[in-house]
Every structure is written in C-alpha cells, then in structure tokens.
Image (cartoon, grey):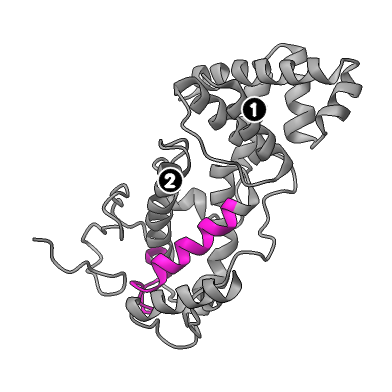
Amino acid sequence: MNTRRLRRYVDDLLAGRRPRGFRPDDDEADDIRTAIALRAARPGQRRAQRRVRHPACAVGWPMSSPPPPIRARRAAGRAADAWSS
Amino acid sequence: VTGRRPSPGRQRRDEPRQPHDSTAASVPRLHVVGSDAYPDWEEIYRDNVERVYRLMFSKVGNRADAEDLTTEVFLAALRPLRVSANIGEVRAYLLATARSVLAAHWRRTLGRQITDLDADRIEDVFPEPPSTDKAAAQARRILAALPERYRRILQLRFLEACSIKEAAAEMGISVANAKVLQHRALREAAAADRRLAP
C-alpha cells in the first residue's frame, strides 16, 4: 500500500480538484469508495454548475436538427478540442 | 456477427434494450415512466443534464470529473436516440450509457471499478419530485458507526468543508495529528461501510 498516493487522492477530492489516478489495492479502493460517498454527501455541492459542456459546443451540433453522423461529430469534436486547447 | 444495434424509438417495447457499449451492464426491461416524448434533443438534454450530473457526482465525488462524464454520457447517448422515444425510454438509455461511461472512467483512472450504477434504477435516478437524499443517508449511517473522534474529523473535513488546519484547530490537535486521524478514520469508515452494505 502506498499511503501517500491515497492521501493525495483524498486531498484532491476534499479540495474539489480532479484526483490524480493511481493503481489502488483492495483496501485503498474501499477507502476511495467511502471518501466519495462522504464527499458526495456534502450539502449544496451537487448541483450542476453550468460547466457541463453542452453537446452542441462539444461537437458543433445545433440540437434543433438531428445529430450528424458519428464520423462528422468526431471530426468536429477534435476540431473543437484543438480550438479550446 | 453482431447485428445493427437498435435505438430507442425504433426498438419494440417488449424487447430488452442493449446499451451502446458492450462493457455496460445489460439494461433491464423498460419501466415506462410516461408516454410523453421530448419535442427535440435540446429538451432531452435540458430535462436530464442536472439528473445525470447529480448521479455522476455521487459516484466520483468531484465536480470536474462529474461534468466531463455528464458531457460524455450525452455525446454517446444522443446519437442513437430517436426523439420519438418516450421519456422513460430516453432515461433508460441515458442510465445505461452512464453505466458504461462510469466504468470506462474508473478503468482509465484507477484501473479498477470503484463505484458503479448497477443497482441504480430509473425511478431512483430520475425522481420527480426529488427523492430523499441517499448520499446524505449513507454518510449518516457510516459516521454513526464510528468513534467520536473519527466521526468528528470526517464530519469537519468531508461534510463541513474545513481545511486540515481548520479541522485541527477545531479539535485542538496539531495538523500532523489531524492528518493521521483523518487517514485512520477513513480506513475505519470504509470498514463500517463494508459492514453496513446490504
């Protein structure tokens, strides 16, 4: 067990950061599962913050029309990613 | 040889639905929530984005991942959907897609499944009006099973959003002690969670 990686993961969760990945063992996986359950119970933290990327923004698809073919959407998505990065 | 995957709206209602990803848990027979259909894709998104986000947040515990996974769910689910599908069918498909997306997230980040949506049902995930808060109830059960000091440090850190310094001051201990206490408390809470699991 690598306590440091687990602590970093939990610290990230608590600080509202995106936790960094690692390969947890069984005990660490249980700890993470419980940490998520407790973190998710924090009052007032679970409403969407309007930062969910709208599909129309993600792939350039005006949603008043039917979705474009998947190939076109992937290309549009890559273009959008390149634009935003 | 696999045939073309049926899409909601095209599929006969008495057929079990297949999720878009073979890694997803199979979707049970539909429980039709209502006979109404959405007028367009925008409305499907607007009516369900909050619910999917809330669900994802409860499974990953952080906003950034929950936001990305929510977007991923809609991107994956909206293409196969037909606007003619009724609300129950749309939500069943979103839930099936969310299962696959969450499973892929855990494989990618931690190499193993940490949380899943296998036991989550449409009636619980898409409640109208909102049901009682399952996450808060689970947290209360876990904390109630802990000794006072363990319960207090987890409450301060996880529920009351205190920094480690603030939590240490509140409990009258050093920051180093608070870190150790939090680690031990979380380990004990995980054991309690396992014991309390149905």
Q: Residue at x 40, y 78 (%)?
A: A75
Q: Secondary structure at mark 2?
A: helix
Please state the horizontal and vertical placement of residue B93, each as a whole percent of the image: 37, 61
Q: Left of A68 or right of it: where is A38?
A: right
Residue type beneath disc 1: Arg
Residue B84 in view = yes
Which residue in the protein does label 1 denote?
A: A7
Mark number for residue B33?
A: none
Please state the horizontal and vertical placement of residue B171, each as a whole percent of the image: 87, 18
- In the rendered image, the vertical position of residue A29 relative to residue A16, given as above or below: above
Crowdedness near tag 2: few (<14), some (14–19) or many (≥20) residues, C-alpha within 10 Å: few
- In the rendered image, the vertical position of residue A21 relative to residue A59, given as above or below: above
The residue range painted magenta reads B65-89
Which residue in the protein does label 2 denote?
A: B108
Residue type beneath disc 2: Arg
Q: Which chain does the residue under circle 2 lie in?
A: B
- In the rendered image, the vertical position of residue B12 relative to residue B192, given as above or below: below
